[in-house]
Image: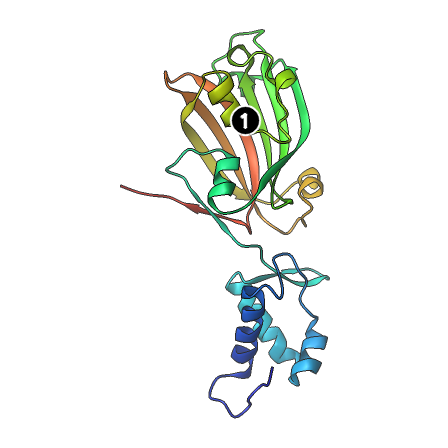
Amino acid sequence: MEINPASSVPLYIQIKDYLHQKVKNGVFPGGTKLPSERDLSLDLGVSRMTVRQALQALVKEDIIYSRTGKGYYACQPRIDQELGVLTSFSEEMLQHGFLPTSRVILAELQLPTPEIAEPLQLSQGAEVVALRRVRLAENRPIALENAFLVHELCPGILQSHDFNKESLYKVLREAYGCPLTWAKQWVQARLPTLSEQKLLDIDGEIPVLSNKRITYTRNDRPVEYVTSIYLGDRYNLAIILR
């Protein structure tokens, strides 16, 4: 790239636009580290201060992000999740053109804690299916999900299905005649815990969206209680108000 000092466009804007095009065109795919300030200043023949100004402008526009002591990285493409529509993770990813996969961390029957039993309206002694998964899009971790299901409504589900590959909502709908039709959901932003950082391969500085959801079937019976976190730099929540 040739920087034009005589242009009316400030140098840092020229550099910002140049790097933006590199990210947009896939020269720097999502998650890729950009050249250092020093390398960029030498390649472009400008001061490091000018390069830093361009990089910080890109950070403000969510084109790149910084990792303390590690440099600048291209942001992953963002996924818009429409909160007015109930979809599974797999359906959501496919709608956006991403291949969804999962990595099962835990799959077992449990006696629920009061925090889980109450939203599922379970009596004492009733079991839940506990399913913890790292959810991936194009083999990149994007979410960590803890699902608790009323075992009475899906007996034998863990023995009959592989949730590294299968969609939970599809199995409930097709194998158990239990379609999930509506849900209540709560969302808040926070920083990830150490265990979440390890499972999602992220720094503690990257915010996550923490979700809680109770999902119901046709007769308003709760079927699933989910706690999950999504990468804050990958997700936009779109809310439709009518």
Element type at marker 1?
helix
Q: Give the labeled residue for mark 1.
A: 168
Q: Is residue 226 above or below residue 77?
A: above
Q: Is residue 85 left or right of residue 204?
A: left
Q: Is residue 135 above or below residue 216?
A: below
At 58% from the left and 15% from the top, the residue drawn is 128
User: Toward the viewer: 209 or 181?
Assistant: 181
At 57% from the left and 77% from the top, the residue drawn is 15
At 42% from the left and 33% from the top, the residue drawn is 86
For the N terminus, the image quarter is: bottom right
Looking at the picture, how far across and down is residue 88, in whole percent? 49, 33
In the image, farthest residue toward the left: 242
Looking at the picture, how far across and down is residue 23, in whole percent? 57, 65
Q: Is residue 169 above or below residue 57?
A: above
Q: Is residue 80 left or right of residue 54?
A: left
In the image, farthest residue toward the bottom: 6
Q: Is residue 227 left or right of residue 49?
A: left
Q: How is the image coloured?
A: rainbow
Looking at the picture, how far across and down is residue 218, in whole percent? 37, 19
Looking at the picture, how far across and down is residue 134, in whole percent? 64, 36
Q: Is residue 4 above or below residue 165?
A: below
Which three-letter amino acid code belongs to the residue tagged 1? Leu
Q: Quadrant of residue 65?
A: bottom right
Count the marks: 1
Mark 1 Cα shell of 10 Å, populated few (<14), some (14-19), many (≥20): some
For the C terminus, the image quarter is: top left
At 51% from the left and 52% from the top, the residue drawn is 78
